[in-house]
Amino acid sequence: MNRKIKMRILKEAQDMKDTNHTIREIAAIYQISKSTVHKDLTERIQEVDPYLAQEIRKILDEHLKLRHIHGGESTRIKYLQLK
C-alpha cells in the first residue's frame, strides 16, 4: 500500500477516535468521498493498524446504533420549522 494512503488512513482514524466525527464529517474535513473514508476505515485500516481498526469498529458500530435516532430528530425539527 502506498505510504500516502497509509498516512491518510491513520489521520482519518485518529480524527475519528479523538473527536468521534462521523464518516460524512471526516469526508468533508479531508475533502474526499464518503465511500473512500468508509473503505479506509472499515477495510484498509486492518492492514495498517489492526488495534486501531478494532477501536474504529466500535465507534462505527455506535454511530450505526444512533443513526435512526439522529434521522428521526432531523425530520422532527424539519417539520416543526415548517409550521
Image: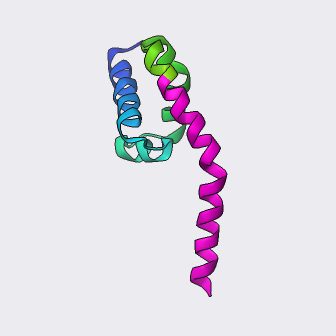
Q: Quadrant of the C terminus?
A: bottom right
Q: Nearer the viewer, residue 8 or 74?
A: 74
Residue 67 colored in magenta in the image = yes
Nearest the viewer among 34 and 60 is: 60
Q: Main secondary structure of the magenta part?
A: helix
Point 55% across, 21% down: residue: 43
x and y, in percent, of residue 44 in the image: 50, 19
Q: Residue extending furthest bottom?
A: 83
In the image, residue 44 sits, relative to residue 63, either above or below, namely above
**Residue 45's x, y, as percent?**
47, 19
Asked if residue 78 lies in the magenta stretch, the reply is yes
Q: Nearer the viewer, residue 17 or 44?
A: 17
Judged left or right of residue 29, residue 60 is: right
Q: Position of residue 81 (x, y in %)?
A: 57, 81
Q: How many marks?
A: 0
Position of residue 71 relative to residue 7, above or below, is below
Q: Nearer the viewer, residue 53 or 38?
A: 53
Would residue 55 be found to the left or right of residue 29 on screen?
right
Residue at x 61%, y 84% (from the top left corner):
82
Residue at left offset 60%, top offset 80%: 80
Q: Residue 30, relative to residue 70: is it above or below?
A: above
User: Would residue 51 appear left or right of 11 to someone viewing this image?
Assistant: right
| Image colouring | rainbow
* Residue in the picture at 64% in, 43% down: 65
- Quadrant in which the N terminus appears: top left
Whether 11 is drawn above or below 31: the answer is above
Position of residue 62 measured from the top left corner of the image (x, y, whole percent)? 57, 38
Magenta residues (range): 55-83
